[in-house]
């Protein structure tokens, strides 16, 4: 495995099916969704189905993103009464800069608004990562550097996003990517925030969830590319790199978890990558996709997936202890991670 493993020790989550990590994970485990009509209409005059977060007031835009982020950050550090948000660098995952309908100056606005809401200044090593769904993998690699090279004890990785924005929905509908009455090959838009606290492995009487390998790749046949056949080269490269870093074979993994959210493209890519990497016959090799319950939540999906895994491992309902997670954004960037739930010093 990598000589720089990261332990995921706590989580926080706000989704359309729960306002905390335990509530959201319980709903996802039970395959419960909250899909309902939104305030937006499609081109045919039908209400768009989505998954919105029901906060105590009808906040929207930057304000709602900040409120959700504040909630998950507080939940995530509640495991340690001595820990404060000023002490821990926050790596914030947000939507890609060129995503249609993205709020202007999103990173700075959310960062400033969240600090104002909390009444603090974030740690000087905090950073904004605007890479969409692969942001969590970029953040984990940066967290390694902060923990192992700069000797910081812990790092918070958070993601917040909403696709329930008029211009975004219009663009995705025009590109035939939104699920509507006339298009079943699309995703249901949602919104969410999530955060995980990571650190170097420490003494513990209980097993811990470790990130042992991270890999990246680039796919030239993106979801919008019509003249380039999909071979899943980018995802295959990312998976092989993550497995190599973890010194692990894909046959040793027990299941997968991914950011796929309803579009056939993503499921086809995942299947092709599996065929190219897995060399061992498996009777059953499940793939989890939390977006089935919370919708497409963009940059928030990475920490959501880690939170779901942490709950599943600790409560004992996962199909196994070793899991491959993979992600891809609309720009063609791909990322994969090898995670394992094991005792400190175990294999």
Image (cartoon, rainbow, N blue to C red):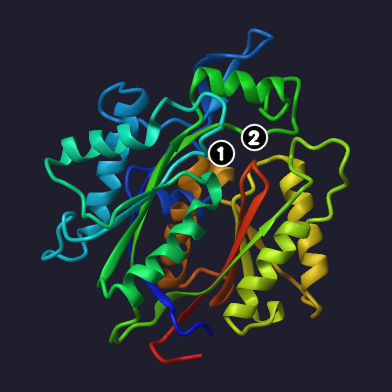
Residue picked out by circle 2: 187
> Can you tell which mark lies on residue 31?
none
* Residue 150 x, y percent position in the rendering: 29, 72
Q: Is residue 87 above or below residue 117?
A: below
- Please give the name of the residue rendered at 43% of the width and 80% of the height, measured from the top-left corner: 4
Is 154 left, or right, of 143 in this rendering? left
Asked if disc 1 and disc 2 are in contact, CB closer than 8 Å, the reply is yes
* Residue 293 x, y percent position in the rendering: 54, 43
Q: Residues within 10 Å of mark 1 (few under 14, many from 20)?
A: many
Is 85 left, or right, of 202 in this rendering? left
Which of the 4 image quadrants contains residue 338? Answer: bottom right
Q: Is residue 195 above or below residue 64?
A: below
- Please give the name of the residue rendered at 33% of the width and 68% of the height, measured from the top-left corner: 146
Describe the element under mark 1 as helix, strand or loop.
Answer: loop
Residue placed most toward the observer, 222 or 312: 222
Is 196 left, or right, of 101 in this rendering? left
Is 22 left, or right, of 327 in this rendering? left
Which of the 4 image quadrants contains residue 262? Answer: top right
Give the CA separation, mark 1 to mark 2.
6 Å
Quadrant of image for the N terminus: bottom right
Residue picked out by circle 1: 296
Residue placed most toward the observer, 215 or 55: 215
The answer to whether any part of residue 13 appears in the image is yes
- Please give the name of the residue rendered at 28% of the width and 87% of the height, measured from the top-left corner: 203
Describe the element under mark 2 as helix, strand or loop.
Answer: loop
The answer to whether any part of residue 199 appears in the image is no
């Amino acid at each position: 495995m990598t000589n720089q493993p990261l332990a995921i020790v706590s989580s926080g989550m706000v989704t359309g099916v729960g306002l905390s990590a335990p509530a959201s994970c319980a709903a996802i485990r039970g395959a419960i969704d909250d899909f309902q009509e939104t305030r937006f209409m499609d081109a045919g005059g039908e209400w768009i189905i989505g998954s919105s977060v029901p906060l105590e007031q009808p906040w929207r835009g930057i304000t709602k993103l900040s409120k959700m982020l504040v909630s998950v950050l507080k939940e995530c550090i509640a495991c340690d009464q001595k820990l404060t948000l000023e002490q821990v660098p926050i790596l914030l995952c947000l939507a890609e800069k060129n995503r249609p309908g993205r709020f202007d100056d999103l990173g700075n606005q959310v960062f400033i608004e969240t600090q104002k809401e909390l009444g603090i200044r974030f740690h000087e090593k905090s950073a904004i990562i605007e890479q969409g769904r692969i942001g969590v993998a970029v953040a984990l690699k940066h967290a390694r550097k902060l923990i192992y090279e700069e000797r910081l004890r812990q790092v918070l990785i958070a993601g917040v996003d909403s696709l329930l924005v008029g211009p975004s929905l219009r663009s995705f509908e025009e590109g035939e990517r939104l699920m509507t009455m006339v298009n079943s090959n699309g995703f249901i838009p949602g919104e969410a925030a999530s955060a995980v606290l990571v650190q170097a492995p420490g003494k513990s009487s209980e097993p811990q969830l470790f990130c042992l390998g991270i890999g990246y790749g680039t796919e030239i046949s993106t979801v919008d590319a019509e003249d380039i056949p999909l071979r899943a080269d980018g995802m295959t490269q990312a998976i092989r790199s993550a497995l190599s870093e973890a010194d692990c074979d894909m046959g040793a993994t027990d299941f997968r978890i991914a950011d796929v959210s309803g579009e056939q493209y993503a499921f086809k890519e995942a299947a092709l990558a599996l065929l190219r990497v897995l060399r061992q016959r498996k009777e059953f090799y499940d793939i989890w996709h939390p977006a089935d319950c919370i919708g497409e939540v963009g940059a928030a999906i990475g920490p959501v997936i880690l939170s779901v895994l942490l709950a599943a491992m600790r409560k004992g309902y996962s199909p196994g202890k070793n899991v491959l997670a993979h992600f891809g954004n609309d720009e063609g960037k791909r990322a994969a991670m090898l995670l394992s739930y094991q005792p400190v010093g175990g294999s």
